[in-house]
């Protein structure tokens, strides 16, 4: 390492692995320049051996802002940050520990005694994901929550929409919401997948749609055959391009209020929109469709073992599954009621 003065400012020159590095110290004081040069050499050495030095002043709020700006965040990360930031915002990232995560859990319970362990687990999973991102970006040397043990979740019964409730709900919902309900019940797609579905990815000639915007890698570009009523609905409204479902020409972002209104007007018990996805899965199961085919249709994330199964689920097997679903529906109600189902008045 050498120091040379140029124009009244000291520069540092050094070679690492055959590469020559140079940097201005920004000072004309040789003693200060020597200290800065030593720091520069230390940083190069750390990069050489992939040693990460954390900034002890970096707060979680600052890290969360970097994460959101990076483009790596998903909508659910931003949602969970609403609960994480009030507790962790001013805490330096290097001070986040499993013990602190337990304190967060206790604080969440104190503020809301009715909160479920599953809800807090999702918050902490988002926190752990952000810390993994920080590790990948070399902002921290390791994720302190890498082996965080989550609370055991109680299994709860999933709400399933009956065929009668389905008919009432479709009749009470607004135009864009009834279209979303139909797609959820007949494809098992997630709400975000439905609102992101584009006409360019709907093949009405082959009666199949392609999901190209999914929450999980397994859900990307999966193909779902259309039921007869969904195919008829899409043909009536077919466009060459653009979103399949919109609201006054704009993407649908939130349906919470319109969903609650539709349930109330239909006189249907409280269910979540996501329960329509569970309804699709349950109906397939009742129709005798094998688990791996159901998972392939729904784009479930189940690890590398199931990913290998997906490659063997061909379109004919999926078509047969949808046909079984339609036969099951016909068998569950009188013929005249099925006609109402098949020709449901979707606004």
Image (cartoon, rainbow, N blue to C red):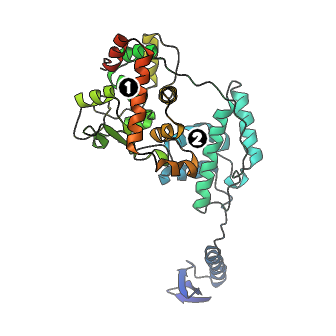
Question: Quick one: label 2, few (<14), some, or many (20+) residues within 10 Å?
Answer: some
Asked if one can make out residue 237 in the rendered structure from this viewpoint, the answer is no
Q: Which residue is rendered at x = 75% and y = 34% of the image? A: 106
Q: Which residue position is annotated with label 1?
A: 182
> Which one is nearer the viewer's eye here, 59 or 322?
322
**Residue 211 at x, y percent in the picture:** 39, 42
Q: Where residue 81 is drawn, which disc sits there?
A: 2
Earlier residue among tags 2 and 1: 2
Answer with the quarter of the image where residue 83 lies: top right
Question: Quick one: label 1, few (<14), some, or many (20+) residues within 10 Å?
Answer: some
Question: Pointer 2 and pointer 1: residues touching (CB < 8 Å)?
Answer: no
CA distance for labels 2 and 1: 32 Å
Asked if one can make out residue 55 in the rendered structure from this viewpoint, the answer is yes
Q: Is residue 308 above or below residue 150?
A: below
Asked which secondary structure carries label 2, the reply is helix
Is 249 situated left or right of 190 in this image? left
How many discs mark residues in the rendered view? 2
> Which one is nearer the viewer's eye here, 222 or 11?
222
Q: Which residue is rendered at x = 43% and y = 11% of the image? A: 266
Asked which secondary structure carries label 1, the reply is helix
Is 258 situated left or right of 128 in this image? left
**Residue 39 at x, y percent in the picture:** 65, 76
Q: Quadrant of the N terminus?
A: bottom right
Q: Where residue 123 is drawn, which disc sits there?
A: none
Q: Which residue is rendered at x = 47% and y = 38% of the image? A: 298
**Residue 233 at x, y percent in the picture:** 28, 27
**Residue 79 at x, y percent in the picture:** 54, 38
Q: Quadrant of the C terminus?
A: top left
């Amino acid at each position: 390492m050498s120091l040379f003065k140029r124009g009244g400012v000291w520069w540092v020159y050094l070679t690492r692995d055959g590469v020559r590095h140079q940097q201005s110290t920004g000072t004309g004081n040789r003693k200060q320049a020597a200290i800065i040069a030593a720091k520069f050499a230390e940083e190069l050495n750390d990069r050489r051996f992939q040693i990460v030095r954390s900034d002890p002043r970096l707060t979680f709020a600052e890290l969360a802002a970097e994460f959101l700006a990076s483009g790596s965040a998903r909508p659910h990360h931003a949602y969970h940050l609403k609960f994480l930031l009030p507790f962790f915002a001013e805490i330096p990232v290097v001070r986040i520990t499993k013990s602190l995560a337990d304190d967060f859990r206790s604080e969440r319970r104190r503020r809301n005694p009715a909160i479920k362990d599953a809800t807090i687990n999702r918050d902490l999973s988002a926190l752990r994901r952000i810390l993994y991102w920080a590790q990948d970006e070399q902002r921290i040397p390791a994720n302190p929550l890498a082996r965080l043990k989550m609370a055991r979740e109680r299994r709860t019964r999933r709400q399933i929409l009956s065929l009668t409730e389905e008919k009432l709900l479709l009749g009470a919902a607004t135009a864009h919401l009834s279209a979303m309900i139909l797609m959820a019940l007949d494809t098992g797609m997630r709400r975000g997948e439905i609102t992101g579905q584009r006409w360019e990815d709907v093949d009405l000639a082959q009666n199949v749609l392609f999901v190209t915007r999914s929450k999980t890698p397994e859900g990307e570009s999966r193909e779902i055959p259309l039921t007869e009523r969904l195919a008829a609905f899409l043909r009536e409204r077919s466009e060459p391009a653009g979103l399949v479902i919109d609201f006054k020409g704009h993407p649908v972002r939130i349906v919470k209020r319109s969903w609650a209104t539709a349930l109330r007007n239909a006189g249907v018990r409280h269910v979540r929109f996501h329960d329509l996805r569970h309804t699709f899965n349950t109906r397939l199961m009742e129709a005798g469709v094998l688990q791996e085919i159901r998972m392939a249709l729904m784009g479930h994330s189940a690890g590398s073992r199931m990913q290998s199964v997906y490659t063997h689920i061909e379109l004919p097997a999926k078509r047969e599954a949808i046909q079984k679903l339609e036969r099951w529906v016909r068998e569950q109600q009188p013929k005249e009621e099925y006609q109402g189902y098949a020709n449901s008045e979707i606004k």
